[in-house]
Amino acid sequence: MIVEEDVEAVEANLFVTSNVIKLCFVDSFGGTTAQDDAISFRYTIDYPRIELHPFDTKRFKIVYSDDKNNANYSLNKSLDLKALTRQSRDLIALAIKCFSAHTYY
């Protein structure tokens, strides 16, 4: 998973569970960084939202709410991500949408 911040791209691991979405950044040696260097989101019926890129089949955006965000960063309420394949992007989007709807019911 690649996180794109303006011009800079950062490699990260995305973990999607039924309770939380967690984005852990990868350091230059290939390992994950400190536990404080991660972003996590909790599900609500409205957030996080997934927006798939219309032309690039690997890109998508996660739009989230500020009050459900747990991070040490000042982010702009959205993350632009690039998955390794189209299938992994679609599976991530489907899982997030299903877990978000599950919190409502």
Image: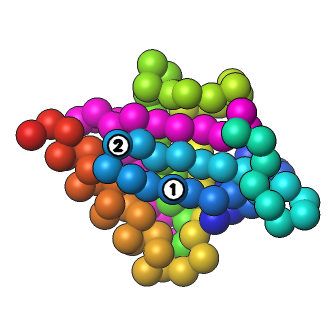
Question: In the image, 1: left or right of 43?
Answer: right
* Residue 96 spot, x, y in % from top left: 34, 54
* Residue that carries the numbered disc 1 in the rendered image: 15
* Residue that carries the numbered disc 2 in the rendered image: 19
The quarter of the rendered structure image containing the N terminus is bottom right
Along the viewing direction, whichever of 79 and 99 lies nearer the viewer: 99
Q: How crowded is mark 1: few (under 14 residues within 10 Å), some or many (20 or more)?
A: few
Mark 2 belongs to which amino acid? Asn
Q: What element carries label 1?
A: strand
Report the number of numbered marks: 2
In the rendered image of this protein, does residue 25 appear above or below residue 28?
above
Residue furthest to the left: 105
Question: In the image, 18: left or right of 84?
Answer: left
Q: Residues within 10 Å of mark 2 (few under 14, many from 20)?
A: few
- Can residue 104 be seen here? The reply is yes
In the picture, residue 75 is in which quadrant? top right
Estimate the spatial distance between the alpha carbons at disc 1 and disc 2, rounded to whole Å.
11 Å
* Residue 98 spot, x, y in % from top left: 23, 55
